[in-house]
Amino acid sequence: MTTHVHYDDRLGTWNVTGHPEMLSALNDPATFSSNIPRLFGEHPDDRISDGNLVQTDPPDHRKLRSLANTAFTPKVVAALQPRIVELTTELLDAVDGDLELVSQLAHPLPVIVIAELLGVPVSDRELFRQWADLLLLNDGEFTAKDEDGAQARRFQEMAAALQPMADYLLSHLNERRTRPREDLLTRLVQAELDGERLTDGQLVNFTTVLLLAGHITTTMLLTNTVLCLDENPEHAAKIRADRSLLPGAIEESLRLRSPFNVLARVTAVETALGGQVIPADRMVLLWANQANRDPRVFARPDEFDPLRDPNPHLSFGRGIHFCLGAPLARLEGRIALNLLLDRFPVLRTDPADPPVLTATTNSTGVSRLPLRTAY
Ligand code: HEM
């Protein structure tokens, strides 16, 4: 019998691979807490979680999220459309001959969009890339045992390596305190939760998530969708001819190549899931990449089908932590891919210069995607 929830004795983690089981966990934040550092007690990593939306539980999460929601209303996101078109056009105008999609479009576009939204200088984007790579390359296995302390050291090293980013963001936040501007950083330093301003630590962690979550994943979404089209030329031809199929293709790309493969939770109490009993205080890994191919929910689960409807993939998560930036990511995806298809009648991977996959268990993406633009 297929099990959808199983314990990994080596790592001490519970693993959830079924769709209904993952959904149950995501919809029950009281049992499946996002406060991962609680598992490590007085772990030094605590300092990177205060104010970090992704690792905060209710009631604090509700307050922080309502603050974040005001920055990402449908109106704010829709208003970005002309700028995203302009940026994509500029980036594509600079392409001369064949295309390397990551460096020429998929990375710069989302980074510039989020930097402009926050109000940090776009010219620093190489720095953002280095910090994001640090996070991505830090792909050690999650373990709940950590008997040799390797994971604790990894977290510490990561916090230390990201300190320059914290200093960078804080200097910009401080500047807004004295010289307010029309940007998100200014709104954040002025915002109040329960009548109090956010602390420096909360502000830094909050903006870190926006800056990094706001681009790494969207870069992957763009490249992953182009890879799906490359692998499915018949669908690609139909999508070129009928662009109303593109949003469905983007959802299928998200389902089959989920940028984040895995989400982490900690059990607050003993609970039953998928016929198993998980004790309290255990790390639970929710594998979106596997839940997205659960044959109980998705017919022909390994097939790319842009017409799949409904398509309840879990690549943006679900429940109270559902991705704040999903409307922005989808908008960037639609604009960039439409303009890319308009511009290049041919977009094919090159067997002589194949894509370079990011070889991590936590994410699905590429670091280089050379494309031929002529037969
Ligand atoms: C949360 C995926 C783009 C900001 C999440 C979560 C996932 C996710 C799976 C849930 C984490 C959890 O439950 O533990 C993605 C993917 C993206 C994307 C696949 C692109 C294709 C963006 C963008 C932004 C963003 C563009 C910001 C501009 C956030 C934030 C959260 C979040 C702030 C935390 C929400 C909360 O905890 O309440 N994202 N994301 N994401 N995402 Fe995204």
Image (cartoon, grey):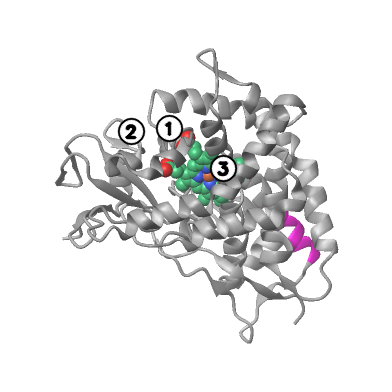
Q: Are marks 1 and 2 in contact (CB under 8 Å)?
A: yes
Which of disc 1 and disc 3 is earlier in sequence?
3
Q: Which residues are magenta?
A: 334-343
**Camera-side residue: 61 or 318?**
61
Under circle 1, the secondary element is: helix
Tell me if residue 249 can be seen.
no
The residue pinned by badge 1 equals 320
Q: Looking at mark 1, is its residue's CB closer than 8 Å to ligand 1?
A: yes
Q: Amino acid at mark 1?
A: Ile
Q: Measuring 52% from the left and 33% from the top, which residue is drawn there?
A: 201
Q: Amino acid at mark 3?
A: Thr
Q: Measuring 76% from the left and 57% from the top, which residue is drawn there?
A: 339
Label 3 and label 2: CA atoms lie apart by 23 Å
Q: Position of residue 204 (x, y in %)?
A: 56, 37
Under circle 2, the secondary element is: loop
Q: Position of residue 286 (x, y in %)?
A: 33, 50
Left or right of residue 233, residue 205 in this image? left
Q: Quadrant of residue 372?
A: bottom right
The residue pinned by badge 2 equals 29
The residue pinned by badge 3 equals 208
